[in-house]
Image (cartoon, rainbow, N blue to C red):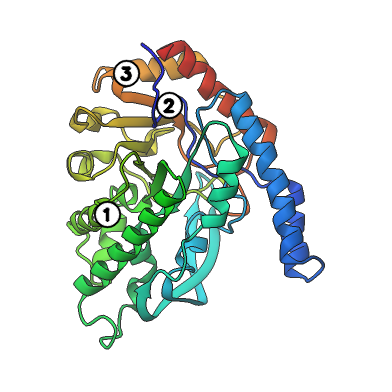
Amino acid sequence: MATRSKPPFRAEHVGSLLRPAAVKQARRDRAEGRIDAAKLRAIEDDAIQTLVQCQEELGLQAVTDGELRRDSWHMDFYQQIGGLVARGAAPIKFKTASAEIDYVMPALHIEAKLSLPKTIFAEDFAFLKSATRVTPKLTIPSPSVLHRRAIAALDNPALYPTLDRFWTDLAAVYAQEIARLGALGCTYLQVDDTSFATLCDPAQRESLSKIGADGAHIHETYIRVFNEAVKARPAGMTIVTHTCRGNHRSAWFASGGYDFIADALFNRLDVDGFFLEYDDERSGDFAPLRFLPKGKLAVLGLVSSKARTLESKDTLKRRLDAAAKVAPLDQLCLSPQCGFSSTLDGNDLSEAEQFAKLRLVAETAREVWG
């Protein structure tokens, strides 16, 4: 069974990579006024070139910039949408098997009609494209996650008297962004949507219902808006989505198998592939893969980006065999379950352990698919 000539590829990774020490120091220096923005970007450029080379040497057919220029996987994007203002704090409680971890991000407020003043991440993508000889993959957050971040601020009837008008404007912003990225040469776009997996947790659905959203049906709206956002994507652009249950300092905030959402997600979401978290029991079993339609791929996140222990090839192959009893092996790919550094802090493992896991993914994929 041959490797694929277009994305998603047999060996993948979600996107974010651990920030090198030099980048973290440079960000501190910039925040405290010791260096200017140009110097910070030059340091980030050097680090990204090194990361790209490492990904290429592993044999990966698509590479990212590791999201090195971001504080988090999503907020840097949202704060560049016109009409959104970051003000105050929005705490989130993550958890591990033995502890709880607090994470505080900026709170988002809607103070004007949503718009796209400039192409978000345009310069970042252009640099990545210039730095690689394989396919550059860009990652952006989804419309639905913004809804979950900004829902408390949707209380200004002068701007958005109905939620439908908010969704219409937000989808239009995304449609413009995707068209502009296509014009820059982006052919592989990953739209990260943690909402889908977190809605598999009954507690998450209940919490949304308590603040006015219909937790049992909100995923249907999220799918509709996502599809509106991508329906005019440029010819030749592959769009995938990644969904997980939270990823910050090796912690999470939701659990539950894909059963609740699988049929609607796999059959109605207008994407070419799904990056699915599948590294431990919190993700459930492979049974929901039975809904995967022909022509779409599932990238199984069987390798943990949270744990330092390196998985064995035999274990990965056995799990792929198990998944292939539900969905055809030719519709499956392999990756870590999430990014290694969805936030600036990064997960609790070393850069050497990170690349050992990516090497494992690449080698296992070659042995399984050829």
Amino acid at dot 1 = Phe
Q: Quickly name the residue at label 3.
A: 322
Q: Nearer the viewer, mark 2 or mark 1?
A: 1
Name the disc covering residue 207, or none: none
Instruction: Judge depth for marks 2 and 3 and give the one in front.
Output: 2
Measured as percent of width and height from the top left, residue 222 is found at 25, 57
Foreground pick, 86 / 4: 4
Query: Is residue 97 visible in the rendered structure shown here?
Result: yes
Percent across and percent down for residue 105 are 53, 66
Element type where label 3 sits in the image: helix
> Which residue type carries mark 2?
Leu
Residue drawn where x is 22% and y is 74% of the image: 165
Mark 2 to mark 3: distance in Å? 13 Å
Find the residue positioned furthest to the right.
34
Q: Do the residues labelled 2 and 1 touch (CB within 8 Å)?
A: no
Q: What element carries label 2?
A: strand
Q: Distance between the residues labelled 1 and 3?
A: 31 Å
Residue that label 1 marks = 226
Which residue has dot 2 on it? 334
Q: In x, y percent, where is residue 204?
A: 31, 57
